Image: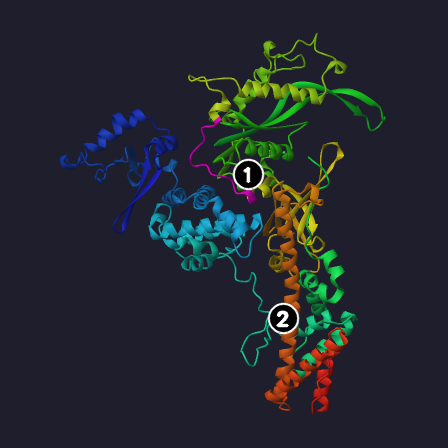
Amino acid sequence: MAHPILIKQYGNKHTIWLNESYLMQMCDIKSEYLRVRIRPLYRDSVPLSSRNLAILPDSGKAWRWARINNAFYYAYANIPDRKPCFYKSMLPSEDELIKLAMEADKPNVVELTNEFTSMAQQKVSPCDMHYYMFDCEPSFSQQKAEQLVLGLGFCRLITELIEENRFKKWFNKKEDLFDCFSKIIAPLELEGLKISKPAALRNKIAGFPKSTAKQLDYLVSARYGNDYARLVGTFQIVHPETGEVMKFDAHEAIMYESWMNPFNANKRSKIDLYTNDYKPALEQYGLHAVSHRTFCQYLNRFDNKALMSKERDGDKHFNDNYKPYVPAHLVQYANTMWVGDGSGTKLAYSYMHTDRKTNKTLLKQATLYLVRITDVASRMIIGYAFGTSETPDLVKQALKMAIKTAGNVEALEFLSDNGSAFTVADVKSSLNLIFKKVRNIKPGNSQENPAEMHVKMLTNMCRGNNNWLYSGFHAHDINNNTNPDYFPKPSELPSMEETHLQVLEAIEKYNHTPWGADQLTPIQRFENKNPKCKLLEPRALRHAFGNRTEVDLSHMRGFVNVNQVQQGGHIAQFKFEIPDYDMNIHTISERLGYRSAAKVMVCWDENAADIYTPEGAYILTAKRAELAAKSAFEATDISNKALGKHLQRKEKMISAADTMRDSVIESADVMKYGHRLHRGKAIKDEYNEEMEMCLAEQIMERVITKKPKTHPVIKMALTPEQVAFNDFFNA
């Protein structure tokens, strides 16, 4: 489109050119007058040698013109302003024309925002989203992952525009680019890309790495997962002989040993242990003790509580509450462009309605609602759900069925209308996880959605039913409406369940009806899938369409137990096995912030359960537990294999608890030994001789009396302070 105003610079001077259309509009001049009289008259006023130039020279006469970009322009300085028309007075002043020209050259902010946002989204893929949700350390909720992915796309886009000088298509200078992008990005407040000024964006892009792998971690803030303010765990204990760094530091060794009270039956309260054991011991070493609240927090941590329970509370409590068990059977014998649309089926049904005011029950008539997911290429209806109105739950049910019909193979693009159920945030989040591209039709253009064609075909297939009302297409046509004289009364209409069967029959008939030159059915065509399609990420499927339950893992002993109410009120129980529970118990506790309770969100189906933090950050996946047989007479190879596996899990948990106890004791003993050497009142050889004598006495005492293991006090020539310190640890 030709610009109405052009400014041409010639040295220190500039010339304002006005487009012929603009001039005709402002001065009310006829095109024929300019073509027949004005242009030939001015061309005759310039030298012969210059008459064929695109821009005619200034001869001093009125109506100087030029041909620029296949359009006629007239010099503002040569437009006459005399009787009878005063053309120049009809135009804006020179300054106003310059201002209008500059405004016209400015880019449209809204258009640039939409264009650059779309370009940034093309620079990323669902794999980037999955990385931030499932594989990144730390993992993020879907909302923050979407922000990180969009920020990553902006960084990649800006880097490409700068490196290849492609930004000059929109901007004259890099400063203009950073200024524009900062105005686009700042209001979004993206995770990892929260900038407010162009300078901040410039600095962020300056450090953006070229490696794709490094780019993914570039926007992840270093504040996640740091332990700079942590006190417990920083005062390491080093073995004086081997140089080995003990697993537990001074804080942990004292608090855990005093809490477990190894090989003793008594139990002391936390406030007693904190006041009389933990604080005095640390003060002797000149260490700062943590608060009582922090002390209790470490003892109440889910992983510590589980692993220390065996020594503090005994085997029975540990076995009943924390040690994984063997799940078993009950004693019995016992098996690529998609479109979405929702509309009424035009089939009436009857139902009982109770009036709230009068409390009377009446028989009423309603129309069945149907949400459909259709494959465009094959025209097969691959997913559907029934209801009384369009709701997000119906959309999710239909999508879940469609994905199952496709064998969990992804579709590349999803198109839907602008119905509220398809545009609600929850549904859009699920769609963004499953499809590479999700879009809605333009408002007011329902025919853009290919699903509308299937609506008409399905409606026509239902015409044979006596409870058919009308067609949604050309509804005013008498042939598209039922005969009201013979339409059934509410008492004669089918029930909702019977109407379901009518629609299912129509869908089956539709999917098995051949079409096209090759006369293949939609089902046959659906087998020919796009080779670019891959299997969907199972975790993404469960996150989008799986069941969601909040559970507390601290009492489930290595399993995730969930229940589901099925048809008929039957409650089905599902059991999922947390892998490597003896090690992953620490991971779960860490991700949950080392809380006493292990409350998590579980997204699950019949095969596996994904464990998330309550905020939505992914932790790990637990597969369906294999069950052993409770009776040897019902045992099979599979149940025997499951039995062996779960027995091994039990042994691993016992070993983990024993290992923690031994590590705590070893750390505490090394701490005492190092303290004595530091005081200078005993030497290494004397200490070793005393320990050998003590061990020999213990062995002899056990052989003779067979009494439980005890810790005799080592008699040494020590100062009263040393004696008090050793008595403190041997108490």
- Residue 710 rendering spot, x and y as whole percentages: 74, 76
Total marks drawn? 2
What residue is disc 2 on? 663
> Is 533 one of the magenta-colored residues?
yes
Dot 2, crowdedness within 10 Å: few (<14), some or many (≥20)?
Answer: some
Q: Is residue 573 above or below residue 264?
A: above
- Residue 386 rendering spot, x and y as whole percentages: 65, 27
Dot 1, crowdedness within 10 Å: few (<14), some or many (≥20)?
Answer: many
User: In which quarter of the view is residue 46 placed?
Assistant: top left
What residue is disc 1 on? 431
Q: Is residue 477 above or below residue 158?
A: above
384 relative position to 563: left or right: left
- Residue 76 rendering spot, x and y as whole percentages: 31, 39
User: Which residue is nearer to you in this view: 150 or 117?
Assistant: 150
Res. 615 visible in picture: no
Q: Residue placed at 50% from the left, 36% from the top?
A: 409
User: In which quarter of the view is residue 226 placed?
Assistant: bottom right
User: Which residue is nearer to you in this view: 394 or 641?
Assistant: 641
Q: Amino acid at mark 1?
A: Leu
Q: Which segment is the magenta one?
A: 526-539
- Residue 489 rendering spot, x and y as whole percentages: 74, 13
User: Which residue is nearer to you in this view: 424 or 543?
Assistant: 543
503 relative position to 108: left or right: right
Q: CB under 8 Å between callouts 1 and 2?
A: no
Q: Using the numbered discs, state the Cα–Cα distance from disc 1 to disc 2 in whole angstroms.
A: 49 Å
604 relative position to 40: left or right: right
Q: Residue placed at 59% from the left, 76% from the top?
A: 237
